[in-house]
Amino acid sequence: MSEQTTAPKAEKEPEEQAPARARDLTSWLPTLVDSIAAVVLALVVGAVLIVFSTPRVIESLSYVFSYPLDFFEYALVAVWDGYRALFTGSMGSLGAWERTLERAAPLVCAGLGVSLAFRSGLFNIGAQGQMLLGALVAGYIGFSWDLPVGLHALVALAGALVAGGLWGAMAGVLKARTGAHEVITTIMLNYVGRFVMLYFLGKEALQRPDSDNLLSPPPADSARFPELGSLHIGVLLAVLAALAVWWLLERSTLGFEMRAVGANPDASRTAGMSVAKVYVLAMTLAGVLAGLAATMQVLGKGDSLTDQVAGTVGFDAITVALLGRATPLGTVLAGLLFGALSAGGLAMQGAAGVPPELAQVLQALIVLFVAAPALVRGIFRIRGKGEGSGVMATGWGA
Amino acid sequence: MKLEIRGLTKRFGSFTANDHIDLTIEPGEIHCLLGENGAGKSTLMNMLYGLLEPTEGEVLLDGEPVTFETPGDAMAAGIGMVHQHFMLVPVFTVAENVMLGREQTRGAGLLDRKAAADLVRELSGRYHLAVNPDALVEDLPVGVQQRVEILKALAGGAQVLILDEPTAVLTPQEIDELMGIMRELKEQGTSIIFITHKLREVKAIGDRISVIRRGKVVGTAKPTASEAELAELMVGRSVNLTVDKAHVTSGTTVLEARNITVVDPRGHQVVKDVSFEARAGEVLGIAGVQGNGQTELIKSLLGLVRPDAGEIWLDGKDISKHGPLQSLEDGIGYIPEDRSHDGYVGSFSVRENLVLDLFRNDEFSSGLALKLDAIAANARDRIAEFDIRTESADSPVSSLSGGNQQKVVVAREFSRPLKVLIASQPTRGVDVGSIEFIHKRIIEERDRGTAVIIVSTELDEIFALSDRIAVMYDGRIVGTVSPDIKREDIGLMMAGAHEPVSGGAA
């Protein structure tokens, strides 16, 4: 045990060491290998959970030494059935794909917001609050105003984008003006957002007449997103948003400034960029994207407003962004994966013996493994790039 | 104690930082290790001091092979190290710092401060290292703090002392004192490994000189070798150590600072009532030991720091309230002292860094859209013009050597028309070959009629480039002199003495 706990000598850079300084936010991002490893590892741990929660497998353990083949056969069958149900439920049919895409769309949009802020050096934990504000405005316009079909949806959409953007901008302005850390302010604004929602839900004007719960009427049909086949166009909007964010980051002057500020604010300031402007703009755009995510729930799915209208999308978006390494394409792929887990999780409940919570457990495991890349690297013995990885690596590798 | 290094090798992945290094350090010898930044000197010393594990090879002390797992092992074996960045606790006294890690106690776990102070007195008496054991480290000048580091190593029983770039933070007078201490230590039998890239110092103090280039010992030399020979060994080709520059008559005043005062966030006045002018076609050198207000002064010139009092005039226009963007647009070129901190974005490609403050120009963008072709073409031209050694224009700047990183910054600042060029430590951590090149470009810029302001803590650089020298001490300009002043006189001014009579006012 003792030799396992001694940390190995830190492998220093071959160049003369640079003076210590605050680590840039991107050092939090997993590498592509880390991201894939996290998903694989989650599936492996998930398989173990399936095995040990299947009654037939547990029973076979009591005679495993007489007939070991039974245990292995039942275990394999259980894992196979479970993951097959997950797969067919998310990608096995047209309907499954539709469910996956509709669940992925809000995750992608909110995830893009988190990614965009991340690339600008801001850790935006506030997608949830930004979504709630977007949902509130979209929902209110959706059921209380009377506008022609099409225009109604557009106005409700615009309202949601503005509301989400303003909510995001608050954290940006606080950071730029006072230096208040965005992690703290966005978390706090999530609470404020939830209570703003509850406050308005308590008002007569937002109460659904036939219900005793704090619940608004659903949006009018004229405010709903039009459908292509049985998919609402929100899915298309999510794809357009991803393209727009890609263009902004990689092809525009504003994105150049955002990435520069995110990677080195001091050099950016010296090169004449306004770090404050970038912070405010990045948080505003992040809020706009979260507002767009909210419209998927309200105008796309047609949900009534409750304080749960955003579900956990705003928080899952953080994992989606990190798993996607804060790039637009990565965020889309990670959003699809989470959408698939969510859609497939429902289908899995039908499969015999599989715990219905498994999809959520898988998501949670991915969160865990993305957040602890050192752990994942240790398990797979991936050579670490960060200095912090060494300690974990011996604990598991040796 | 005799220290032998045999075939010591360190690889980081495919990169070989040290390649079969053989060195012998005789007892009571000052052995200079000369090499450019990134040549592998620090890697070698970190292996000797137990901070890095050698890939191959062995270390012998008095003929016995030894391995060091931690710096503690190395210290126990009699190897001490004084790092470039001091490892002292500022709020502790000298004695407390010296006893740190080997605290003696009197019963009941009480610290025996008196024993520690006595030890400091005993050691400082024996080696003529004047230090007050009861002084707080934070109150001591840098040169004395360095003595505390040496005392710490000696208190640990060091017989081989490694000094890593010890002169970088010292005034010329303090360097002389340090050399005195080194001679004293040597006479008492301590071996010293003296790491530096400054040729003058090597010649002044070394008994033997080993030159390291690209991780290999490329030669040994006697201190009688000429500076040109040593430089050639170090770089691998002959180098021109002096900057050729024609004498020019300076033109009109371009930039004028009037009574600038800057107060730092902690409320200290770091720049005190500084006035000077920079003239067209002239290099104004600002000399001074690190931390005497130069950093804040030039930051205020660009608008990164708002001066608390005073005015800055550029071409008859008051620019005191301008931010960096306006200052850059007004034609100020700026090479910051810490390039990785302020000069470039490490994760950005060479191509992107070459337009870091130019991307707004019509040449490189229209509206919101970047003109990628123009940016790529610009990178091709600059890389060729400034001989930037990079795998491709797409490589992140952090993957380049220090000299090439600096060339990226310099190339960028020189790629627009300038009225004033402000360059702080333009060649710090840069190899000799690139120093030559950068100095040449700076003089070319001067000859084009730009007013140039050079801030440097290296007197060699100040003397090589300047047409006029302003010396800063404790936030003030204590005098402005012509470059034919004697080194010693300018050294005195850097240490706070007033303008000497012998220095001709410029």
Image (tube, rainbow, N blue to C red):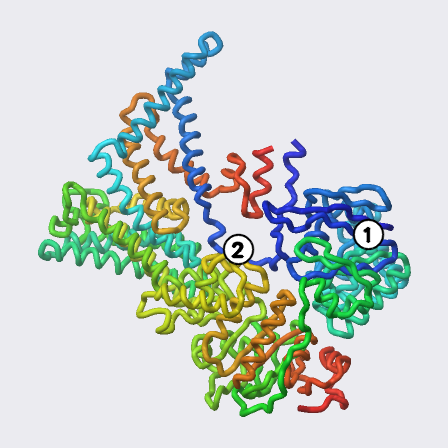
User: Eyeballing the image, is A333 above or below B23?
Assistant: above
Q: Does residue A313 appear to the left or right of A14 in the view shown?
A: left
Q: Is residue B319 left or right of residue B149?
A: left
Residues at marks 1 and 2 on the same chain: no
| Quarter of the view holding residue B463 | bottom right
Chain bearing mark 2: A
| Residue at the spot of label 2 | A23
Pick the residue in front: B466 or A170: B466
The image shows residue B218 at horizontal and vertical percentages of 72, 56
Question: Residue placed at 73% from the left, 46% from the top?
Answer: B8
Location of residue B495 by image quarter: bottom right
Chain letter behind tag 1? B
Residue B451 sits above or below residue A298 on the image: below
Identify the disc placed on residue B24.
Answer: 1
**Amino acid of disc 1:** Thr
- Between A261 and B101, the one nearer to me in the picture: A261
x%, y% of residue B51? 69, 48
Residue in the picture at 66% in, 91% down: B506
Task: Identify which residue, B33 or A36, lies in the foreground.
Answer: B33
Query: Does residue B135 appear in this view?
Result: yes
